């Protein structure tokens, strides 16, 4: 027994040394308190020891005017900065709404927009603002839905139903609020969040594209950066203060609290923290997941997005009207593509998969050393390995079906209409989420908006044709029969695709509206080629959906046990991966060394704008801005350490997608910038974080204020946010 204990201890030490050596490889020292912290876990942090000067309870305490209530989800993150509902977020977050509001004659994307009065503010199409009101642990109730001997698919289905029931009850008990249950640790913990959702959001100020997207994709994910990535919007409500759809009678929303702006900004070494809604991280997932992402999914998606971007850029040469149809799609895909390229480079540069496998080998030794652990946890890692291996083998076929629906707008419309007819016949709690009563209006609006702002027929045809080629090239065992029938024996693809698109009315908004209330048997009688294809492929999508349910049920069970055994072995508690819920992360304003003998300072300045300007996109600085820079009349917004206006800054917070627009907050709780990106080396943040190279990028509030005051002439907005 003693020998076994010594052997187990030896293995634990070995594992710890492996872990420490890996972290030293990444950081040079063990990182402390890295992570995107749920507000329920803030008591584990002593933020005042780290540099916070304000009362930590003012970050979140329901009985106080907490900063929590100043932070909103607007597609990514934003924050209230005035008592009249003024929101600051990123230019790229509001990008789609700006595109939707633009025409070739009024090109707000290219030329910018300023509302000089409240009456001039224009709707930000498709935009809502979601405010977290409260949260509570509902894990026991969610997991009580699991019964003994359930299949994995039924387990997932039972949890889905239980979550919908909890949400329905919460919304009934809190009229006008929106409830969501978030999975914190898969298969283990679930939290119920209650939100206020504001539905009338309007554009107030949008900088010209040459400022808001200065550097474009050349500079995306890169440092040094000189992008004025900010936009101002305003939230409105009905005269009685309740959330409402757009109406001229609506009034500005008065937030419970808002962020005060610090026009003096921050200096190198200063403590900062962010509040925001980071999307997804994957730090608790196994090496088999990393292998699947690195070797299968991310390369395929990056290549596919690059193909579409090249297509859309070529199509956009036809006219500015056509370009506006593509701008938002290109922006989103280019951001993801470059992010994936960065992640792949980082994973390979750090040999992260090999390190992860080495860690898991030591963990498996620890499991095998004890009969009890072996019985409970022995098949956890092998089980996950098999699931992700199977997913990799099936991916080529799944890729075609997923992207057919995601990338071809007319097919997406047909599938949505068909599914609506089928799902709307079920009891509300048994429907897929998009077709539940609480979501259905939004689903219809999103489809109509996409058709109006993003659809260009030649692009849709070209994308469909490419996916059909890929479908026909699949191995025999993976063939998709309904697609193969479109071009038997690899027949004339052009003719087959052109006939399909000529024989559909899925680009006609009135036609689609006429189908929303039809029943499945009525839909089956509609003579439309794209709708027929959707009907033929519907069983394939249902099969994928059911397979995903079964896999999720199995993975949740295995992943829950993996978290348990890792926490036991490492002797510490984890915080859950980011999942779109409100989180806090903190750090300092600091540079870093990306390569030997190269140091990146933490601030860029307007001098860099002049140095980068070429007169050609994406470095075509507006002449008025160049004139202002040359005059050097920087006034109160100057950085005294730099003797000029700072543009962007670096800081060592832990962020990911969804943190775009997060307020950068100083030690006293004041706004000093707006987060919008990570450095190239930090694209790997989704998998691991490093004090050495994980840096986030934000636009400095001094540059924002200077642009508003001296370039836009928006003194009324500065006065509103308390800058006099």
Image: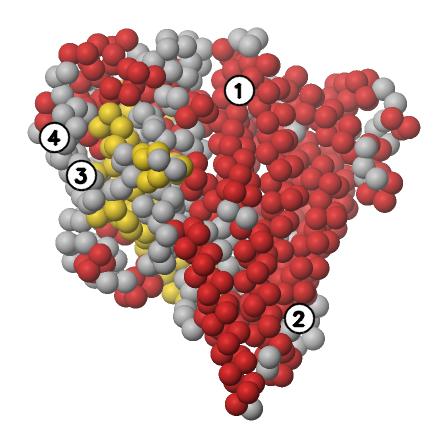
Residue at disc 1, secondary structure: helix
Q: CA distance from mark 2 to mark 3?
A: 51 Å
| Placement of 561 over or under 411, stated as above or below | below
Image point (43%, 36%), residue name: 680
Q: CA distance from mark 3 to mark 4?
A: 9 Å
Q: State the residue lying farthest toward the front.
A: 597
Q: Which residue is mark 4?
A: 640
Q: Which residue is mark 1?
A: 325
Residue at disc 4, secondary structure: loop
Q: CA distance from mark 2 to mark 1?
A: 50 Å
Sequence-first disc among 2 and 1: 1
Q: Which residue is mark 3?
A: 267
Sequence-first disc among 1 and 3: 3
Image point (51%, 83%), residue name: 6
Q: Kindly indicate whether the residue at mark 3 contacts the one at mark 1 (C-beta within 8 angstroms).
A: no
Q: Kindly indicate whether the residue at mark 4 contacts the one at mark 3 (C-beta within 8 angstroms).
A: no
Sequence-first disc among 2 and 4: 2
């Amino acid at each position: 027994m003693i020998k076994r204990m010594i052997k187990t201890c030896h293995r634990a030490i070995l594992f710890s040394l492996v872990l420490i050596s890996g972290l030293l490889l990444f950081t040079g020292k063990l990182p402390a308190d890295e992570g995107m912290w749920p507000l329920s876990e803030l008591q584990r942090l002593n933020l005042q020891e780290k540099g916070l000067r304000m009362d930590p309870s003012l970050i979140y305490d329901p009985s106080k005017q907490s900063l929590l209530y100043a932070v909103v989800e607007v597609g990514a993150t934003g924050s209230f900065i005035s008592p009249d509902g003024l929101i600051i977020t990123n230019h790229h977050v509001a990008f789609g709404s700006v595109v939707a509001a633009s025409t070739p004659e009024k090109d707000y994307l290219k030329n910018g927009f300023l509302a000089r009065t409240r009456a001039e503010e224009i709707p930000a199409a498709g935009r809502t603002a979601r405010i977290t009101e409260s949260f509570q642990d509902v894990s026991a109730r969610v997991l009580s839905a699991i019964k003994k001997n359930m299949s994995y698919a039924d387990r997932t289905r039972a949890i889905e139903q239980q979550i919908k029931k909890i949400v329905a009850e919460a919304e009934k008990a809190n009229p006008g609020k929106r409830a969501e249950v978030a999975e914190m640790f898969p298969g283990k913990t679930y939290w119920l969040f209650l939100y206020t959702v504001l539905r009338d959001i309007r554009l107030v100020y949008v900088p010209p594209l040459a400022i808001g997207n200065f550097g474009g994709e050349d500079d995306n994910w890169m440092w040094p950066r000189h992008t004025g990535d900010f936009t101002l919007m305003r939230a409105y409500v009905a005269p009685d203060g309740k959330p409402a759809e757009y109406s001229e009678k609506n009034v500005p929303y008065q937030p419970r609290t808002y962020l005060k702006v610090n026009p003096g900004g921050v200096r190198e070494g200063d403590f900062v923290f962010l509040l925001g809604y980071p999307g997804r991280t994957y730090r608790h997932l196994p090496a088999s997941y990393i292998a699947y992402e690195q070797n299968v999914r991310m390369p395929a998606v990056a290549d596919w997005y690059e193909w579409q971007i090249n297509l859309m850029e070529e199509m956009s040469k036809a006219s500015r009207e056509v370009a506006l149809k593509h701008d938002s799609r290109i922006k989103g895909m280019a951001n993801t593509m470059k992010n994936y390229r960065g992640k792949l480079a980082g994973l390979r540069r750090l040999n992260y998969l090999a390190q992860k496998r080495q860690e898991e080998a030591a963990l498996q030794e620890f499991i095998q050393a004890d009969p009890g652990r072996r019985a409970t946890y022995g098949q956890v890692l092998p089980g996950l390995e098999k699931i992700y291996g199977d997913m990799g083998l099936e991916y080529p076929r799944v890729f075609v079906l997923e992207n057919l629906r995601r990338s071809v707008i007319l097919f997406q419309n047909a599938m949505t209409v068909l599914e609506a007819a089928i799902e709307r016949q079920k009891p509300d709690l048994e429907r897929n989420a998009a077709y539940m009563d609480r979501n259905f209006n939004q689903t219809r609006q999103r489809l109509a908006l996409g058709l109006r702002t993003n659809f260009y027929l030649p692009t849709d045809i070209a994308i469909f044709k490419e996916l059909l080629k890929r479908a026909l090239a699949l191995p025999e065992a993976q063939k998709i029969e309904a697609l193969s029938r479109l071009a038997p024996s690899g027949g004339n693809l052009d003719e087959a695709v052109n006939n399909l698109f000529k024989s559909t009315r899925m680009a006609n908004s009135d036609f689609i509206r006429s189908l929303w209330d039809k029943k499945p048997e009525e839909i089956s009688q509609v003579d439309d080629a794209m709708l027929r294809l959707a009907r033929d492929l519907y069983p394939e999508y249902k099969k994928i959906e059911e397979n995903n349910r079964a896999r999720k049920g199995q993975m949740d069970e295995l992943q829950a046990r993996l978290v348990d055994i890792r926490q036991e072995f490492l002797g510490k508690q984890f915080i859950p991966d980011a999942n779109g819920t409100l989180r806090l992360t903190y750090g300092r304003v600091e540079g870093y060394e990306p390569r030997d003998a190269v140091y990146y300072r933490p601030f860029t300045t307007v001098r860099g704008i002049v140095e980068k300007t070429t007169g050609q996109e994406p470095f075509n600085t507006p002449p008025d801005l160049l004139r202002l820079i040359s005059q050097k009349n920087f006034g109160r917004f100057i950085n005294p350490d730099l003797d000029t206006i700072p543009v962007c800054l670096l800081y060592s917070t832990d962020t990911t997608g969804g943190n775009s627009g997060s307020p950068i907050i100083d030690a006293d709780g004041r706004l000093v910038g707006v987060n919008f990106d990570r450095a190239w080396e930090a694209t790997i943040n989704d998998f691991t974080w490093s004090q050495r190279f994980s840096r986030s990028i934000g636009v400095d509030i001094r540059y924002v204020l200077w642009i508003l005051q001296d370039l836009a002439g928006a003194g009324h907005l500065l006065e509103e946010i308390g800058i006099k």
